[in-house]
Protein backbone atom coordinates (compact mmCIF):
# COMPACT_ATOMS: atom_id res chain seq x y z
CA UNK A 1 0.00 0.00 0.00
CA UNK A 2 1.10 3.57 -0.59
CA UNK A 3 1.75 5.93 2.27
CA UNK A 4 -1.36 7.91 1.35
CA UNK A 5 -3.52 4.79 1.47
CA UNK A 6 -2.08 3.82 4.86
CA UNK A 7 -2.76 7.30 6.17
CA UNK A 8 -6.32 7.21 4.84
CA UNK A 9 -6.95 3.85 6.52
CA UNK A 10 -5.53 5.13 9.78
CA UNK A 11 -7.91 8.12 9.81
CA UNK A 12 -10.90 5.94 8.93
CA UNK A 13 -10.02 3.50 11.72
CA UNK A 14 -9.52 6.31 14.20
CA UNK A 15 -12.85 7.96 13.41
CA UNK A 16 -14.67 4.63 13.75
CA UNK A 17 -13.50 4.70 17.34
CA UNK A 18 -13.58 8.41 18.15
CA UNK A 19 -16.71 9.68 16.43
CA UNK A 20 -19.09 7.52 18.51
CA UNK A 21 -17.18 8.62 21.63
CA UNK A 22 -17.53 12.30 20.76
CA UNK A 23 -21.20 11.88 19.82
CA UNK A 24 -21.80 10.16 23.16
CA UNK A 25 -20.02 12.95 25.06
CA UNK A 26 -22.22 15.51 23.30
CA UNK A 27 -25.41 13.51 23.84
CA UNK A 28 -24.72 12.90 27.52
CA UNK A 29 -23.87 16.54 28.20
CA UNK A 30 -26.99 17.67 26.35
CA UNK A 31 -29.23 15.26 28.24
CA UNK A 32 -27.74 16.37 31.55
CA UNK A 33 -28.53 19.94 30.62
CA UNK A 34 -32.08 18.98 29.66
CA UNK A 35 -31.43 19.74 26.01
CA UNK A 36 -31.94 17.47 23.00
CA UNK A 37 -28.60 16.15 21.64
CA UNK A 38 -29.65 17.34 18.16
CA UNK A 39 -29.54 20.91 19.47
CA UNK A 40 -25.73 20.74 19.37
CA UNK A 41 -24.03 20.72 16.00
CA UNK A 42 -20.62 19.09 15.63
CA UNK A 43 -18.00 20.87 13.55
CA UNK A 44 -15.04 18.59 12.81
CA UNK A 45 -11.89 20.70 12.93
CA UNK A 46 -9.50 19.35 10.28
CA UNK A 47 -6.83 22.06 10.67
CA UNK A 48 -3.31 20.67 10.79
CA UNK A 49 -4.45 17.34 9.34
CA UNK A 50 -4.08 16.18 5.75
CA UNK A 51 -6.84 15.67 3.18
CA UNK A 52 -7.08 12.01 4.25
CA UNK A 53 -8.57 13.18 7.57
CA UNK A 54 -11.14 15.25 5.73
CA UNK A 55 -12.06 12.32 3.50
CA UNK A 56 -12.45 10.05 6.51
CA UNK A 57 -14.76 12.63 8.11
CA UNK A 58 -16.91 12.81 4.97
CA UNK A 59 -17.02 9.01 4.73
CA UNK A 60 -18.21 8.90 8.34
CA UNK A 61 -21.09 11.20 7.44
CA UNK A 62 -19.73 14.46 8.83
CA UNK A 63 -20.53 17.52 6.73
CA UNK A 64 -19.50 20.47 8.90
CA UNK A 65 -15.73 20.96 8.70
CA UNK A 66 -13.66 23.72 10.31
CA UNK A 67 -10.34 25.36 9.51
CA UNK A 68 -8.63 28.22 11.33
CA UNK A 69 -6.46 29.70 8.56
CA UNK A 70 -7.56 31.03 5.18
CA UNK A 71 -4.32 29.64 3.68
CA UNK A 72 -5.30 26.14 4.73
CA UNK A 73 -9.02 26.44 4.11
CA UNK A 74 -8.66 27.49 0.48
CA UNK A 75 -6.57 24.59 -0.85
CA UNK A 76 -8.57 22.01 1.09
CA UNK A 77 -11.89 23.41 -0.15
CA UNK A 78 -10.53 23.53 -3.70
CA UNK A 79 -9.26 19.94 -3.47
CA UNK A 80 -12.73 18.74 -2.46
CA UNK A 81 -14.85 21.14 -4.50
CA UNK A 82 -18.15 19.57 -5.44
CA UNK A 83 -18.35 17.51 -2.25
CA UNK A 84 -21.14 18.32 0.13
CA UNK A 85 -19.20 20.25 2.76
CA UNK A 86 -20.26 23.11 5.00
CA UNK A 87 -17.03 25.00 5.69
CA UNK A 88 -16.56 26.83 8.97
CA UNK A 89 -13.83 29.45 9.31
CA UNK A 90 -13.00 29.39 13.02
CA UNK A 91 -9.72 31.32 13.28
CA UNK A 92 -8.78 34.98 13.17
CA UNK A 93 -9.31 36.54 9.73
CA UNK A 94 -7.16 39.51 8.75
CA UNK A 95 -9.31 42.21 7.18
CA UNK A 96 -7.41 42.03 3.93
CA UNK A 97 -8.36 38.35 3.67
CA UNK A 98 -12.04 38.96 4.39
CA UNK A 99 -13.10 38.46 0.80
CA UNK A 100 -11.20 35.20 0.44
CA UNK A 101 -12.68 33.86 3.65
CA UNK A 102 -16.21 34.82 2.62
CA UNK A 103 -15.81 33.17 -0.76
CA UNK A 104 -15.05 29.75 0.72
CA UNK A 105 -16.56 29.58 4.20
CA UNK A 106 -20.29 29.15 4.77
CA UNK A 107 -20.04 30.43 8.32
CA UNK A 108 -17.27 32.64 9.70
CA UNK A 109 -17.12 32.15 13.47
CA UNK A 110 -14.44 34.68 14.19
CA UNK A 111 -15.61 38.20 13.41
CA UNK A 112 -13.62 40.09 16.04
CA UNK A 113 -13.80 43.73 14.92
CA UNK A 114 -16.23 46.17 13.37
CA UNK A 115 -13.68 46.73 10.61
CA UNK A 116 -13.64 43.05 9.60
CA UNK A 117 -17.44 42.98 9.81
CA UNK A 118 -17.62 45.93 7.40
CA UNK A 119 -15.31 44.20 4.95
CA UNK A 120 -17.43 41.05 5.01
CA UNK A 121 -20.66 43.04 4.75
CA UNK A 122 -19.32 44.67 1.60
CA UNK A 123 -18.91 41.22 0.02
CA UNK A 124 -22.48 40.37 0.98
CA UNK A 125 -23.81 43.58 -0.55
CA UNK A 126 -21.93 42.95 -3.78
CA UNK A 127 -23.35 39.46 -3.99
CA UNK A 128 -26.82 40.78 -3.51
CA UNK A 129 -26.33 43.50 -6.11
CA UNK A 130 -25.08 40.92 -8.58
CA UNK A 131 -28.04 38.68 -7.77
CA UNK A 132 -25.69 35.85 -6.82
CA UNK A 133 -26.34 34.60 -3.38
CA UNK A 134 -26.91 36.07 -0.08
CA UNK A 135 -25.60 37.79 2.99
CA UNK A 136 -22.35 36.64 4.53
CA UNK A 137 -23.13 34.48 7.55
CA UNK A 138 -21.03 35.14 10.61
CA UNK A 139 -20.69 34.74 14.34
CA UNK A 140 -19.16 37.51 16.42
CA UNK A 141 -16.27 36.33 18.58
CA UNK A 142 -16.10 37.73 22.09
CA UNK A 143 -13.06 37.35 24.32
CA UNK A 144 -14.92 36.30 27.44
CA UNK A 145 -11.84 34.79 29.07
CA UNK A 146 -9.99 38.09 28.98
CA UNK A 147 -6.78 36.30 27.96
CA UNK A 148 -4.51 38.65 26.03
CA UNK A 149 -3.64 35.89 23.55
CA UNK A 150 -7.26 35.37 22.47
CA UNK A 151 -8.93 37.38 19.77
CA UNK A 152 -12.48 38.61 20.02
CA UNK A 153 -14.27 41.77 21.06
CA UNK A 154 -13.61 42.72 24.66
CA UNK A 155 -16.49 41.48 26.81
CA UNK A 156 -16.92 45.01 28.14
CA UNK A 157 -19.09 46.82 25.60
CA UNK A 158 -19.63 43.68 23.52
CA UNK A 159 -23.43 43.87 23.60
CA UNK A 160 -23.50 47.28 21.88
CA UNK A 161 -20.80 46.30 19.43
CA UNK A 162 -22.56 43.05 18.46
CA UNK A 163 -25.76 45.02 17.83
CA UNK A 164 -23.86 47.57 15.74
CA UNK A 165 -22.33 44.80 13.64
CA UNK A 166 -25.72 43.12 13.26
CA UNK A 167 -27.08 46.33 11.70
CA UNK A 168 -24.69 46.08 8.75
CA UNK A 169 -26.59 45.22 5.59
CA UNK A 170 -24.92 42.38 3.73
CA UNK A 171 -24.11 40.54 6.91
CA UNK A 172 -26.15 38.02 8.87
CA UNK A 173 -25.10 37.58 12.49
CA UNK A 174 -26.12 34.03 13.37
CA UNK A 175 -24.85 34.32 16.94
CA UNK A 176 -21.68 34.49 19.03
CA UNK A 177 -18.48 32.52 19.53
CA UNK A 178 -15.84 32.29 22.21
CA UNK A 179 -12.70 30.32 22.98
CA UNK A 180 -11.91 29.22 26.51
CA UNK A 181 -8.43 29.09 27.99
CA UNK A 182 -6.70 25.70 27.80
CA UNK A 183 -7.04 24.82 31.49
CA UNK A 184 -8.75 22.20 33.65
CA UNK A 185 -10.36 24.72 35.98
CA UNK A 186 -14.03 23.92 35.46
CA UNK A 187 -15.26 26.99 37.28
CA UNK A 188 -13.14 29.24 35.07
CA UNK A 189 -14.31 27.45 31.92
CA UNK A 190 -17.91 27.69 33.07
CA UNK A 191 -17.55 31.44 33.66
CA UNK A 192 -16.02 31.94 30.22
CA UNK A 193 -19.00 30.26 28.59
CA UNK A 194 -21.74 31.68 30.82
CA UNK A 195 -20.38 35.16 30.17
CA UNK A 196 -20.87 34.59 26.43
CA UNK A 197 -24.39 33.27 27.03
CA UNK A 198 -25.25 36.39 29.03
CA UNK A 199 -23.85 38.75 26.38
CA UNK A 200 -25.81 36.78 23.79
CA UNK A 201 -29.07 37.04 25.74
CA UNK A 202 -28.64 40.77 26.18
CA UNK A 203 -27.74 41.31 22.53
CA UNK A 204 -30.80 39.33 21.44
CA UNK A 205 -33.02 41.40 23.67
CA UNK A 206 -31.55 44.58 22.20
CA UNK A 207 -31.58 43.54 18.54
CA UNK A 208 -33.78 41.26 16.45
CA UNK A 209 -30.90 40.83 14.00
CA UNK A 210 -28.81 38.58 16.26
CA UNK A 211 -29.34 34.86 15.67
CA UNK A 212 -29.51 32.09 18.23
CA UNK A 213 -26.22 30.21 17.71
CA UNK A 214 -23.54 29.90 20.40
CA UNK A 215 -20.28 28.42 19.11
CA UNK A 216 -18.35 27.27 22.15
CA UNK A 217 -16.69 24.07 23.28
CA UNK A 218 -13.63 22.18 22.04
CA UNK A 219 -12.09 18.80 22.90
CA UNK A 220 -11.09 19.94 26.36
CA UNK A 221 -14.31 21.58 27.48
CA UNK A 222 -17.27 20.56 25.36
CA UNK A 223 -19.35 19.25 28.28
CA UNK A 224 -19.10 22.53 30.15
CA UNK A 225 -19.89 24.52 27.01
CA UNK A 226 -23.00 22.43 26.32
CA UNK A 227 -24.13 22.85 29.91
CA UNK A 228 -23.88 26.62 29.35
CA UNK A 229 -25.94 26.51 26.15
CA UNK A 230 -23.57 25.81 23.27
CA UNK A 231 -25.27 25.06 19.94
CA UNK A 232 -22.04 24.41 17.98
CA UNK A 233 -18.97 22.57 19.27
CA UNK A 234 -15.68 22.69 17.34
CA UNK A 235 -13.79 19.45 17.82
CA UNK A 236 -10.37 18.52 16.43
CA UNK A 237 -8.16 16.49 18.74
CA UNK A 238 -10.86 14.17 20.13
CA UNK A 239 -11.73 13.14 16.57
CA UNK A 240 -8.46 13.12 14.66
CA UNK A 241 -5.79 12.91 17.37
CA UNK A 242 -2.94 15.31 17.95
CA UNK A 243 -2.19 17.54 14.98
CA UNK A 244 0.83 16.11 13.10
CA UNK A 245 2.76 19.36 13.02
CA UNK A 246 1.80 20.21 16.59
CA UNK A 247 0.18 23.63 16.51
CA UNK A 248 -2.58 25.15 18.66
C1 LIG B 1 -8.13 24.21 16.89
C2 LIG B 1 -9.41 24.83 17.24
C3 LIG B 1 -10.47 24.06 17.73
C4 LIG B 1 -10.37 22.57 17.99
O1 LIG B 1 -9.58 22.32 19.11
P1 LIG B 1 -9.38 20.87 19.73
O2 LIG B 1 -8.87 21.13 21.09
O3 LIG B 1 -8.39 20.16 18.86
O4 LIG B 1 -10.70 20.19 19.72
C5 LIG B 1 -11.66 24.72 18.01
N1 LIG B 1 -11.80 26.04 17.82
C6 LIG B 1 -10.81 26.81 17.34
C7 LIG B 1 -11.05 28.26 17.14
C8 LIG B 1 -9.58 26.23 17.03
O5 LIG B 1 -8.59 27.01 16.57
Image (cartoon, rainbow, N blue to C red):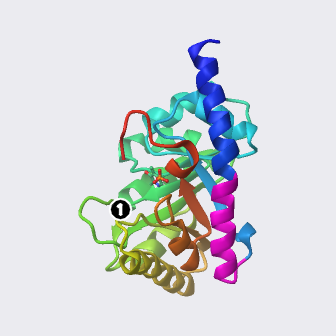
Name the foreground residue: 219 vs 127. Answer: 219
Q: Which residue is drawn at 73% across and 33% down?
A: 83
Name the foreground residue: 12 vs 225. Answer: 12
Question: In the rendered structure, does residue 25 fall within the stretch colored magenta?
Answer: yes
- As displayed, is residue 171 above or below residue 204? above
- As displayed, is residue 113 above or below residue 7? below
User: What residue is disc 1 on?
Assistant: 182
**Residue 167 in sight from this viewpoint:** no
Q: Is the magenta stretch mostly helix, strand or loop?
A: helix
Q: Based on the displayed image, in which of its 4 quarters is residue 210 positioned?
A: bottom right
* Residue 130: image location, x then y, percent: 65, 42
Q: Give the range drawn in magenta.
A: 20-35
Q: Residue at x 59, y 74 (%)?
A: 209
Name the foreground residue: 31 vs 127. Answer: 31
- As displayed, is residue 92 above or below residue 104? below
Work out which quarter of the rendered image holds the N terminus and state it. top right
Name the foreground residue: 117 vs 72. Answer: 72
Amino acid sequence: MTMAALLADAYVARLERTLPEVRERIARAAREAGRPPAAVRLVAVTKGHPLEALDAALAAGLRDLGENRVEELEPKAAARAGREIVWHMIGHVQSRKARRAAEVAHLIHSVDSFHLAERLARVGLERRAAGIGEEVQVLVQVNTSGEASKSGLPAEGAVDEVCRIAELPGLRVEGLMTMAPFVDDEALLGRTFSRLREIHERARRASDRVGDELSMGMTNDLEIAIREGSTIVRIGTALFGERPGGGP
